[in-house]
């Protein structure tokens, strides 16, 4: 705001219509009015002068001075300029942040987004339509990279009613957005805003106090040294470093505790495997010793019983196991025994995949199943646990199951003379099918090459049920013996996006567009638990291997991964950090790490015990990572996505690399840069700016034209991948 | 300012009879329409994402409308993206519309029915084998350079290793298969040893090692290649061929090796030794030594077929086909016929002999007689006759038996029948042998048919 020229002092002090509210000069009648006004001021001033009210006179002179020649008051405070105030105010604080001290920049930069959103929303709800749009257009480019999806939604908000009804906007208006600042940065910011009060500082400050929760944290305690910060700044983009607790849920980093006064200590989770039933354990042991006597282990192999004892004993001291009483299961049957026996056998015989310990990384074998003539109607692909069946859910509301070994899928209900083929169509849903899950099963034991072994449990370990969920907001349970629909579960009132069987069977969870996830048990048609808390669609869902926790991931407006306790139905962890819709979650078989992927092409690894992010894996192109899975040893992660690749990732936390990077003055950062160019070359998208590939990628396998919908590690550590070949693309 | 033109709102208002609409109201409505449309689109995008697609379809819009409690737009169902036409209603004012072709009813009725869309199916292939993407048609062509770049791991690890003071990082060579020094040495020793004519102990030690050593897996492709090489280039040397066959035999005997993937590479070499045209040099080795080699090769082949036939459905038919082809080719020398007969007998068994050899014997007889008359070839022809007899012996396995006793024709009649089936030479031999059960087994074919 340039100071306007002072009005001429000759003859009059005040301009014609001092304080004329909203009355444009054109509408004031004739020259008589202003003259009388002028005279009035003159008279008053003379009066004050005569009376000797010097100070009042000075004040009047000063105040009447601040009018432009037309008699409008000249606004010097940005805060008083209505809808136009936001642009200069935001620019002011942005400029300060970006030219401030480098140490605080990564923290302070995080303030820009919530300020931007609230400035825009306030502007709209104050009915400054055009100003709001101009403001939005002016600054949206800053956030395009990280927040494109939110921007897409916000861009169309025009009138106050939209602010109230839009889900994203109302979440922002209702909840406070948490941002972490160190005390020093916070103090500096406050000081600056106060000093520049007139230039818009007060506007920003009001927004800060009203809509944003600034959490101050001590750098020393969070082990966030200066050097680390600098290094992170180098490696991350210029949008700064996202703090673990940033965002709407406004929780402590990692924990699900949204009470700001609560201690930051995390409640402990029971991450150990579910203990086995005593009876079952006895049966399994008996079966194993029988097996051992029948087929003595080859030299160098341990006996099955030894292997079994080892797996049972292997209970880490720092993890509690969930109690069997808390999560009741039906009593075990012969089938469970057979499955456990098979698990032990696989544990002994499988091809072990070690993590990458300085080497090139394990060689993983991938079998790709490509579906042809789909016309892009396949929504999801699922393989059964015994590697014998594959099921697809289609946009045409039906499910189709094939046997992978070309075995005919027979049913006792087949009419006589019916020629069963190797595929079955399951018809029942009335909307596109988005999720399928097979009940747990174990692979058939390999027929031994020497001698004739027919294992009794073989035929019993195949999956018997399958779940599917659909846009018709139902979940259906299918029998794989008769190939018919058994149960319809209705409770969700929006499309159901995903459904997963519990790793031990009996229970399952579903996630829906109604922002809830629900826990069910197969014999009951009403849900047992409702997991409510997400501020957007619950896009994907996964189980903890011990069956005591459930992971949910949600879409735009929330973008969090939450961990729920099955027994209590509460959130126990919230992980923030994704910048896109969460498209896949998978928990490591060891139960300590969970991986989540978004449609911006990032995979994040979270440590469940500490609630911290341990790694970000970049490399996938945009468009969604549809599936994640862990090797049985939890040493390697495999992912498949819309960019038509299957990628294998190293998941070991690379402590030494970071430490070295510090010492070597960021040499590794440079190498990253070099490999980045390579990543761009690999992706055949031909974009000028290819995706950055993080050095944790062990390998990347491209398919010809098939987006990868599903990847799965078998119990023997072979990767099965499924995708649909796109003729048109 | 909204993207949605406020005039559209005025138009709609006029169409439903509201003549004058306040300017503010129009603008407000236009803004609202734009917001509602984006709402629908955002919901539709969700459906697109969950269908794992990258193109938005009309169904997604219908689903989104349903989710927002709005009646969906009917009549726009389409499985492929809609085609939009563009018309201009003024400068810079394009108008888009869905292209709707005019259909001639008459033509539509008389047109042939469209083809039934192809059935959905799936195929499986290896996307990666132990971390390496095989270059098969199902996989995209990979530029070796980009593959190098894709191996991010190695780059990152070079730095890691360099940082940790271990600077002499071994750079991965372009050859994917790396052999240790020891294995290389072993390979060269073995390959020289088995071709050493002078030292029997040396040779047998080498074979013994091949038979028992457990760590040879890495070397299998090299041995297979070695054998193929030696066989193709040393057809004149019975010794080299025999040694090559013994090497394969040794590998087959080794319990710890898994040879199945290499069988297709081994079989041609064995077949060469079985039905090769000219094996060895008759002047040096004598005219009949190659029959011993052929015998050995056939035993090897039967072993392979026994061991790996069940895992490869095409293995046996392939071998049988090539044997039969060579047997029926009368231009080939007797040696080849001999080998082919042996091969067929071992691979196809009695069933095969009955189905493949027996019907052809009569025709073959002429060729055989010719050979018998020629002194130079008589010896070779004798071998073939013996091979035929051996093949006929195998018929005994599944002969019905018993039939011989009752009322079989005797004497001259038998002779006639035999000659009719087997031809002059072989028929005579069978009769001379005088084994009733064999004669019965041979003639059984007639009875069965």
Image (cartoon, coloured by chain):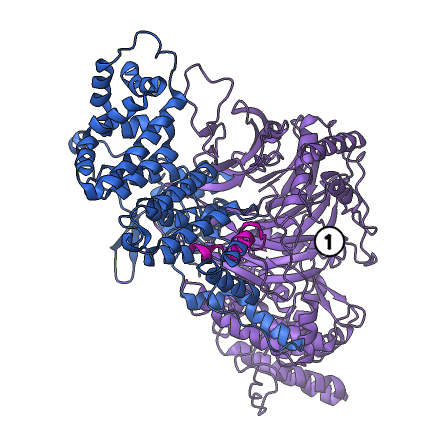
The part of the chain drawn in magenta is: B206-224
Residue A564 location in percent, x, y?
Answer: 72, 45
Can residue A237 be spotted in the picture?
Answer: no
Q: Which chain is purple?
A: A
Residue A239 location in percent, x, y?
Answer: 60, 70
Can residue B338 be spotted in the picture?
Answer: yes
Choose between A645 and A536: the one closer to the eye: A645
Q: Main secondary structure of the magenta part?
A: helix
Query: Along the horizontal axis of the image, is B99 left or right of A112?
Result: left
Query: Along the horizontal axis of the image, is A69 left or right of B23?
Result: right
The answer to which image quadrant residue A466 occupies is top right
Number of marks present in the image shown? 1
The residue labelled by disc 1 is A608
Choose between A165 and B118: the one closer to the eye: B118
SS class, disc 1: loop
Query: Along the horizontal axis of the image, is B70 left or right of A571?
Result: left
Q: Which chain is blue?
A: B
Question: For the point 28% across and 33% down, which residue is it?
Answer: B385
* Disc 1 packing (10 Å; few <14; some 14–19; many ≥20): many
Indicate whether B129 appears above or below A422.
below
Chain to which mark 1 belongs: A
Residue A635 location in percent, x, y?
Answer: 65, 55
Q: Quadrant of the N terminus of chain A?
A: bottom right
The answer to which image quadrant residue A128 occupies is bottom right
């Amino acid at each position: 705001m340039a100071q306007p020229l002072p009005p001429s002092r000759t003859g009059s002090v005040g301009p014609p219509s001092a304080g004329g509210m909203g009355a444009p000069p054109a509408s004031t009648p004739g020259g008589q009015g202003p003259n009388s006004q002028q005279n009035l001021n003159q008279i008053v001033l003379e009066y004050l002068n005569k009376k000797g009210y010097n100070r009042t006179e000075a004040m009047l002179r000063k105040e009447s001075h601040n009018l432009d020649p037309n008699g409008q008051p000249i606004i010097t405070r940005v805060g008083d300029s209505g809808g136009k105030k936001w642009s200069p105010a935001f620019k002011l604080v942005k400029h300060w942040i970006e030219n401030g001290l480098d140490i605080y920049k990564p923290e302070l930069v995080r303030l820009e987004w919530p300020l931007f959103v609230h400035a825009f929303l306030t502007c709209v709800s104050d009915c400054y339509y055009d100003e709001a749009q101009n403001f939005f257009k002016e600054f949206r480019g800053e956030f395009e990279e990280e927040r494109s999806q939110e921007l897409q939604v916000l861009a169309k908000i025009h009138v106050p009613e939209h602010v109230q009804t839009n889900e994203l906007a109302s979440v922002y208006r209702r909840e406070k957005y948490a941002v972490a600042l160190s005390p020093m940065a916070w103090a500096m910011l406050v000081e600056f805003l106060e000093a520049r009060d007139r230039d818009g500082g007060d506007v920003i400050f009001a927004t800060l106090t009203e809509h944003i929760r600034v959490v101050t944290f001590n750098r020393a305690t969070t082990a966030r040294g200066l050097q680390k910060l600098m290094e992170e700044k180098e490696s991350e983009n210029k949008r700064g470093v996202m703090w673990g607790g940033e965002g709407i849920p406004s929780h402590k980093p990692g924990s699900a505790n949204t009470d700001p006064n609560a201690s930051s200590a995390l409640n402990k989770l029971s991450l150990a495997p579910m203990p086995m039933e005593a009876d079952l354990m006895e049966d399994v042991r008996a079966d194993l010793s029988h097996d051992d006597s029948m087929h003595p282990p080859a030299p160098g192999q341990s006996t099955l019983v030894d292997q079994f004892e080892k797996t049972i004993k292997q209970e880490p001291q720092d993890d509690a196991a969930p109690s069997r009483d808390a999560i009741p299961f039906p009593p075990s049957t012969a089938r469970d025994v057979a499955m456990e026996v098979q698990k032990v056998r696989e544990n002994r015989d499988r091809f072990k995949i070690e993590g990458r310990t300085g080497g090139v990384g394990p060689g993983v074998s991938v079998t790709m199943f490509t579906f042809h003539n789909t016309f892009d109607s396949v929504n999801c692909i699922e393989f059964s646990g015994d590697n014998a069946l594959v099921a697809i859910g289609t946009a045409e509301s039906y499910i189709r199951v094939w046997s992978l070994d070309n075995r005919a899928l027979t049913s006792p209900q087949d009419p006589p003379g019916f020629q069963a083929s190797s595929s079955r169509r399951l018809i029942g849903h009335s909307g596109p099918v988005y999720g399928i899950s097979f009940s747990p099963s174990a692979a058939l034991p390999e027929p031994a090459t020497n001698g004739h072994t027919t294992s009794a449990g073989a035929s019993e370990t195949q999956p018997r049920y399958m779940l599917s969920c659909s846009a018709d907001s139902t979940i259906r349970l299918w029998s794989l013996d008769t190939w018919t629909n058994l149960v319809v579960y209705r409770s969700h009132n929006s499309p159901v996006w995903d459904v997963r069987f519990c790793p031990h069977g009996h229970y399952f969870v579903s996630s829906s567009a109604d922002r809830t996830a629900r826990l069910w048990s197969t014999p009951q048609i009403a849900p047992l638990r409702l997991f409510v808390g997400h501020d957007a669609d619950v896009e994907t869902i996964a189980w903890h291997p011990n069956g005591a926790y459930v992971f949910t991931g949600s879409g735009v407006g929330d973008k969090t991964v939450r961990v729920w306790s099955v027994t209590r139905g509460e959130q126990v962890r919230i992980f923030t950090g994704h910048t896109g819709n969460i498209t896949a979650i998978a928990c490591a078989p060891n139960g300590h790490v969970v991986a989540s992927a978004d449609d911006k092409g990032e995979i994040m690894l979270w440590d469940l015990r500490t609630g911290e992010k341990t790694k970000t894996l970049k490399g996938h192109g945009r468009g969604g990572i549809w599936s994640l899975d862990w090797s049985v040893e939890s040493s390697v992660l495999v992912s498949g996505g819309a960019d038509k690749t299957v990628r294998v990732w190293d998941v070991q936390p690379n402590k030494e690399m970071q430490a070295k990077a510090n010492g070597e003055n960021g040499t590794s950062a440079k190498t990253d840069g070099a490999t980045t160019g390579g990543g761009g070359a690999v992706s055949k998208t031909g974009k000028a700016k290819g995706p950055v590939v993080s050095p944790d990628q062990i390998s990347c396998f491209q398919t010809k034209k098939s987006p990868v919908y599903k990847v799965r590690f078998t119990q023997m550590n072979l990767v099965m991948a499924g995708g649909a070949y796109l003729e048109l693309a | 300012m909204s993207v949605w033109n406020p005039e559209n709102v005025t138009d709609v208002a006029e169409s439903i009879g509201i003549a004058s609409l306040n300017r503010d109201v129009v603008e407000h409505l236009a803004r609202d329409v734009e917001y509602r449309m984006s709402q629908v689109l955002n919901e539709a995008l969700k459906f697109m994402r969950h269908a794992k697609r990258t193109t938005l379809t009309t169904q997604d819009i219908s689903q989104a409308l349903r989710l927002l409690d709005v009646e969906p737009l009917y009549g726009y169902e389409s499985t492929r993206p809609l085609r939009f036409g563009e018309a201009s209603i003024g400068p810079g004012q394009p108008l888009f519309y869905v292209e709707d072709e005019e259909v001639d009813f008459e033509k539509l009725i008389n047109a042939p029915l469209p083809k039934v869309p192809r059935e959905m199916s799936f195929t499986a292939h290896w996307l990666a084998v132990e971390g390496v993407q095989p270059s098969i048609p199902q996989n995209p062509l990979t530029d070796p350079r980009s593959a190098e770049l894709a191996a991010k791991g190695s780059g990152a690890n070079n730095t890691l290793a360099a940082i940790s003071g271990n600077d002499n990082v071994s750079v991965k060579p372009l050859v994917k298969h790396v052999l240790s020094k020891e294995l290389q040495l072993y390979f060269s020793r073995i390959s020289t040893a088995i071709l050493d004519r002078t030292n029997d102990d040396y040779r047998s030690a080498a074979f013994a090692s091949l038979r028992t050593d457990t760590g040879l897996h890495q070397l299998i492709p090299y041995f297979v290649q070695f054998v193929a090489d030696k066989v193709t280039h040393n057809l004149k040397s019975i010794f080299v061929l025999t040694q090559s066959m013994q090497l394969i035999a040794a590998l087959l005997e080794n319990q710890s090796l898994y040879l199945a993937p290499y069988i297709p590479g081994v079989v041609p070499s064995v077949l060469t030794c079985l039905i090769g045209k000219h094996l060895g040099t008759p002047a040096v080795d004598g005219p009949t030594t190659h029959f011993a080699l052929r015998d050995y090769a056939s035993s090897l082949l039967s072993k392979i077929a026994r061991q790996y036939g069940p895992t490869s459905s095409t293995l046996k038919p392939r071998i049988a086909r090539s044997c039969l082809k060579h047997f029926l080719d009368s231009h080939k020398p007797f040696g080849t016929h001999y080998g082919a007969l042996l091969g067929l007998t071992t691979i196809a068994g009695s069933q095969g002999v009955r189905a493949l050899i027996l019907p052809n014997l009569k025709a073959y007889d002429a060729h055989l007689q010719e050979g018998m008359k020629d002194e130079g070839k008589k010896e070779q022809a004798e071998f073939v006759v013996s091979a035929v007899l051996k093949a006929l012996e195998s018929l005994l396995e599944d002969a019905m038996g018993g039939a011989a006793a009752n009322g079989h024709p005797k004497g001259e009649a038998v002779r006639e029948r035999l000659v009719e089936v087997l031809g002059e030479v072989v028929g005579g031999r069978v009769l001379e042998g005088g084994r009733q059960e064999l004669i019965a087994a041979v003639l059984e074919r007639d009875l069965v048919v």
